[in-house]
């Protein structure tokens, strides 16, 4: 961690700074060095992490170890290209240290099909895996497996077999709840939902979904109910558009107010992720091409016992996973417009996608609406989009042109998994870590790069007469710092003004400085030093030489 760079005061007393249309410090924003009262995010710096050659669908953190599963066959060290030195076999399952990014060599297993979901037991002694596979290390395992976190070994005594893929898991100290595309478990009829004891014995719990499948599930903090999300339209024959609440003991449908407001179900819509921080349930959703039938794509938070919504973030663009960490809610997807909650707008044509976001857990504002799809959340509580905008490139492995599919972490590190080939322009495939300011390099500095691409704004100097010159220049922006410092320098030697301005990739104002008291006939040029709170510097282009 480095101290902020120096701020040199004006050398010419008559210099004036005119700021037009700027957002000044004090407005809602956040980053690695936010204003007081605003939660800090992790840095956008890419930390060295082992990589995979496909897609990571799901991750879970136990202690300092991240367990990742998906559709991949090889893993390699950071900075190494496909097929390069140090690459190893890793058949759909991999583990690495969230602090270092290094692989955990003691956890090495091979699946014969992709893993879809991985979760942990409440005490962290086990990780449970579900997916398309039918063997682990050559041992028959019917779409479900368990591993010891102490030894890294496959638990061969835990034998559960489903007739189809497992897409969702939730664990209590005594029970593992399953969701997926199966019709039977351990030879007994079960329609997409089931529960087994931790020794693998099938339990009577047998709710059912209709017209779709579960994709996510989470236990309420008191473990009295299982919140289920997916593409289904009914639970136990009752209307439940994409999510609902079930008794953890009996499987009976319980009240869940959220699905009376958020409707996402069918072949092209559903709830993609459900998490809890011990206080609330957090979720995310997708919908594709059917905005008149489905009405949500962002993130939300709800009371775990009633489903009453406490936050509704109407951001357009599918969201695939959410992770609450203290006061910050991280997510991955491909958001392209959050204007209805006071953040970035869409582009025309649509070419910009923000594939990782951070928002406040707490509501801070209200939704506007109705939006361009006719979705109307006007007046419902929303949270603030924080200033954390890592640039993840879309991958090609799944053919879906996505980047991040999963996110996990703790109070110090965030780890994202998916199919991205680069992050912030750095080659880093499938897995990436980022850390809070104390553990990050903090080297991501101001940039002029935006999408759609624009030329670097010129620095211009215009004589005004009377010994005055007006200097105009464009704002830069930073991936993880909203507030930048601008120092205007005359002739490469004299700083004439210093101010701080907030900017973002969608708000890049022009700034004007009037330099006064100059000798008539004197010739000058100008340049601007742009500094973020961590001391990273970018210089603006130089102006032409002009005469006062």
Image (cartoon, rainbow, N blue to C red):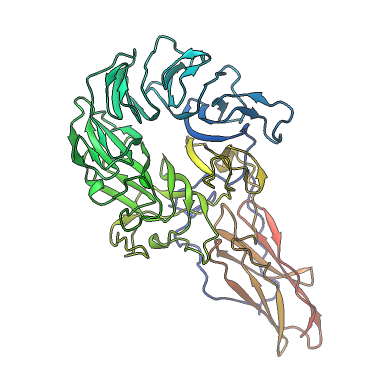
- Residue 128, compared with residue 321, is above or below; it is above
- Residue at image coords 26%, 35%: 209
x then y, percent, for residue 89: 63, 23
- Residue at image coords 72%, 79%: 461
Between residues 537 and 247, which one lies in front from this camera angle? Answer: 247
| Quarter occupied by residue 237 | top left
Q: Is residue 543 visible?
A: yes
x then y, percent, for residue 87: 68, 26
Q: Quadrant of the N terminus?
A: top right
- Residue 260, compared with residue 414, is above or below; it is below
x then y, percent, for residue 477: 60, 60
Q: Is residue 329 visible?
A: no
**72 left or right of 487?**
left
Between residues 227 and 481, which one lies in front from this camera angle? Answer: 227
- Residue at image coords 27%, 45%: 241
x then y, percent, for residue 58: 47, 33
Query: Which residue appears farthest toward the bottom when viewing the image?
Result: 466
- Residue 173, compared with residue 16, is above or below; it is above
| Quarter occupied by residue 439 | top right
């Amino acid at each position: 961690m480095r101290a902020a760079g120096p701020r040199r005061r004006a050398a010419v007393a008559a210099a004036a700074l005119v700021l037009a249309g700027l957002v000044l410090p004090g407005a809602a924003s956040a980053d690695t060095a936010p204003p007081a009262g605003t939660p800090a995010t992790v840095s956008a710096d890419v930390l060295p992490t082992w990589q995979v050659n496909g897609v990571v669908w799901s991750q879970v953190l136990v202690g300092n170890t991240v367990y990742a599963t998906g559709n991949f066959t090889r893993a390699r060290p950071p900075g190494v290209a496909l097929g390069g030195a140090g690459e190893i076999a890793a058949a759909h399952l991999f583990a690495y240290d969230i602090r270092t990014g290094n692989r955990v060599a003691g956890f090495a297993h091979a699946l014969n099909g992709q893993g879809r979901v991985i979760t942990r037991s409440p005490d962290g002694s086990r990780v449970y895996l579900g997916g398309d596979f039918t063997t682990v290390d050559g041992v028959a395992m019917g779409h479900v497996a368990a591993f010891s976190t102490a030894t890294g070994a496959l638990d061969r005594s835990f034998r559960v077999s489903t007739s189809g893929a497992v897409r969702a898991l939730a664990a209590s100290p005594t029970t593992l709840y399953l969701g997926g595309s199966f019709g039977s478990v351990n030879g007994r009829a079960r329609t997409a939902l089931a529960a087994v004891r931790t020794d693998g014995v099938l339990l009577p719990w047998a709710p059912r979904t209709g017209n779709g499948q579960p994709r996510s599930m989470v236990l309420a903090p008191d473990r009295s109910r299982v919140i289920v999300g997916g593409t289904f339209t009914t639970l136990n024959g009752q209307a439940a558009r994409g999510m609902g609440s079930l008794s953890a003991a009996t499987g009976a449908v319980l009240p869940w107010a959220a699905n009376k407001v958020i409707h996402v179900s069918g072949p092209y819509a559903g709830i993609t992720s459900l998490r809890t921080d011990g206080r609330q349930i957090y979720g995310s959703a997708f919908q594709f091409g059917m905005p008149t039938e489905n009405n949500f794509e962002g993130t939300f938070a709800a009371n775990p016992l009633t489903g009453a919504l406490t936050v509704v973030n109407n951001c357009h663009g599918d969201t695939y996973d959410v992770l609450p960490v203290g006061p910050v809610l991280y997510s991955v997807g491909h958001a392209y417009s959050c204007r209805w909650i006071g953040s970035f707008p869409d582009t025309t044509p649509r070419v910009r996608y923000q594939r990782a976001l951070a928002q406040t857990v707490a509501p801070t504002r209200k939704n506007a609406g109705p939006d361009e799809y006719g979705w109307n959340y006007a007046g419902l509580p929303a949270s603030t989009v924080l200033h954390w905008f890592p640039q993840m490139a879309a991958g090609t492995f799944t053919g879906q042109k996505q980047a991040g599919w999963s996110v996990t972490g703790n109070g110090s590190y965030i780890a994202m998994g998916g199919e991205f080939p680069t992050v912030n322009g750095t080659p880093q495939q499938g897995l990436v870590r980022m850390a809070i300011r104390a553990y990050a390099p903090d080297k991501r500095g101001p940039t002029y790069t935006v999408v759609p691409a624009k030329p670097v704004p010129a620095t211009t100097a215009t004589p005004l007469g009377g010994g005055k010159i007006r200097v105009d220049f464009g704002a830069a922006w930073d991936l993880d710092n909203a507030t930048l410092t601008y120092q205007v320098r005359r002739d490469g030697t004299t700083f004439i003004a210093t101010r701080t301005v907030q900017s973002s990739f969608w708000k890049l104002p022009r700034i004007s400085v009037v330099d006064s008291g100059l000798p008539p006939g004197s010739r000058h040029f100008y340049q601007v030093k742009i500094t973020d709170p961590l001391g990273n510097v970018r210089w603006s282009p130089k102006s032409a030489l002009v005469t006062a």
